[in-house]
């Protein structure tokens, strides 16, 4: 397996490290999203490739299907409630795919020219999208936020940030965080790992709004299941401690310029095996520090646009 060139790949979105960034006059040490925490926990070298080297990665049909379906479900709620039907969702699919091709032309390279693969892939998108209507009735929902970018600064000057698929707010103010997954639900022994992402978002929202979300909900379209969890302050404080511990480990690895290659189940899908020492490869030279970036948002906790993960 080889790493594609920038022309054939997509640079990983949402970099975790933003050394030197200033937010509301505070020198931010770095930034983490749930995806980047997951990268480091699964394989520190993968974290380095994505967040420090910023190596482009070829688009994959499952990942791109997820991006397109997320876009359709976002746009579905732009319609009047009575029009949020399976037929309308189907009609939004092709425009969402065309929109993504304009934003990321490299996604076209997933399929051979004039082959049947793209038609089969689009059919799989329709099938996956149809399962959403078996799990929720969008005509009875009025989300408070969709694709909501959130961020907060910890006492350790670490910026926590991410993009929440959907936030529902009940009349009594109770908050539900919803996340769509186009794959199947995990085995029970891996549910905690799956919920970490939503606990991370709940922690950030709690810090921003002073309210612990009442419900975390993962909607798995791959096998038509919904995983729900009710967090409390103890859960979220434990999540914060875990994130800060990961950040300490990242800083230590950065100071040493040593990121371990850790074999695991994810290696089957990793596009960087050719340069991974666990598979006989050689990583590129450690990059020189980048120039500090301009602030993304001027106020800590402000909601501002950012690329989705």
Image (cartoon, grey):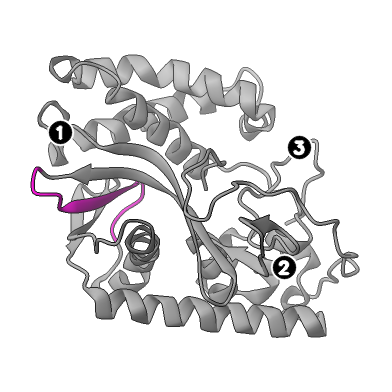
Question: Which residue is depicted at the point 35% across and 37% down?
Answer: 146
Question: Which residue is depicted at the point 26% across and 81% down?
Answer: 234
Which label's residue is closer to the chain start, 2 or 3? 3
> Whole-Å distance between the Cαs marked 3 and 1?
39 Å
Residue 225 in sight: yes
Q: Which secondary structure, mark 2?
A: helix
Viewer-proximal residue, 237 or 16? 237
Q: Which residue is disc 3 drawn over?
A: 8
Callouts 3 and 1 close, C-beta under 8 Å:
no
Label 2 Cα crowd, 10 Å radius (few <14 / some 14-19 / many 20+): many
Viewer-proximal residue, 226 or 159? 159
Label 3 Cα crowd, 10 Å radius (few <14 / some 14-19 / many 20+): some
Q: Which residues are magenta?
A: 171-185
Q: Which secondary structure, mark 3?
A: loop
Which label's residue is closer to the chain start, 2 or 1? 2
Residue 39 in sight: no
| Residue 183 falls within the magenta-colored stretch | yes
Question: Which residue is depicted at the point 17% across and 60% down?
Answer: 214
Q: Which residue is disc 2 drawn over?
A: 48
Question: Which residue is depicted at the point 51% across and 43% down?
Answer: 308
Q: In the picture, residue 287 is in which quadrant?
A: bottom right
> Whole-Å distance between the Cαs marked 2 and 1?
40 Å
| Residue 304 falls within the magenta-colored stretch | no
Q: Which residue is disc 1 drawn over?
A: 141
């Amino acid at each position: 397996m080889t790493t594609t060139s920038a022309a054939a790949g997509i640079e990983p979105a949402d970099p975790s490290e933003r050394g030197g960034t200033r937010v509301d006059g505070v020198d931010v040490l770095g930034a983490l999203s749930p995806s980047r925490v997951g990268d480091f926990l699964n394989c520190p070298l993968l974290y380095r490739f994505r967040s420090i080297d910023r190596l482009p990665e070829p688009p994959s049909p499952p990942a791109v299907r997820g991006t397109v379906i997320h876009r359709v479900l976002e746009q579905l709620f732009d319609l009047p409630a009575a029009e949020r039907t399976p037929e309308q969702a189907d009609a939004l699919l092709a425009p969402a795919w065309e929109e993504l091709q304009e934003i990321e032309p490299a996604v076209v390279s997933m399929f051979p020219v004039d082959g049947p693969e793209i038609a089969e892939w689009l059919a799989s998108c329709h099938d996956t999208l149809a399962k959403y209507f078996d799990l929720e009735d969008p005509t009875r929902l009025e989300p408070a936020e969709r694709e909501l970018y959130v961020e907060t600064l910890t006492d350790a000057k670490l910026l926590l940030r991410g993009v929440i698929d959907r936030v529902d707010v009940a009349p009594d103010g109770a908050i539900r965080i919803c996340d769509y997954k186009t794959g199947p639900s995990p085995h029970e022994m891996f549910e905690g790992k799956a919920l970490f992402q939503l606990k991370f978002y709940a922690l950030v929202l709690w810090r921003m709004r002073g309210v612990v979300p009442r419900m975390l909900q993962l909607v798995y379209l791959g096998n038509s299941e919904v995983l729900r969890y009710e967090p409390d302050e103890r859960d979220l404080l434990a999540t914060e401690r875990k994130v800060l511990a990961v950040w300490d480990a990242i800083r230590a690895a950065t100071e040493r310029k040593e990121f371990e290659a850790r074999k695991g189940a994810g290696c089957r899908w990793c596009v960087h095996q050719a340069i991974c020492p666990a598979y006989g490869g050689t990583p590129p030279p450690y990059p020189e520090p980048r120039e500090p970036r301009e602030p993304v948002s001027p106020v800590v906790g402000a909601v501002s646009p950012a690329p989705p993960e």
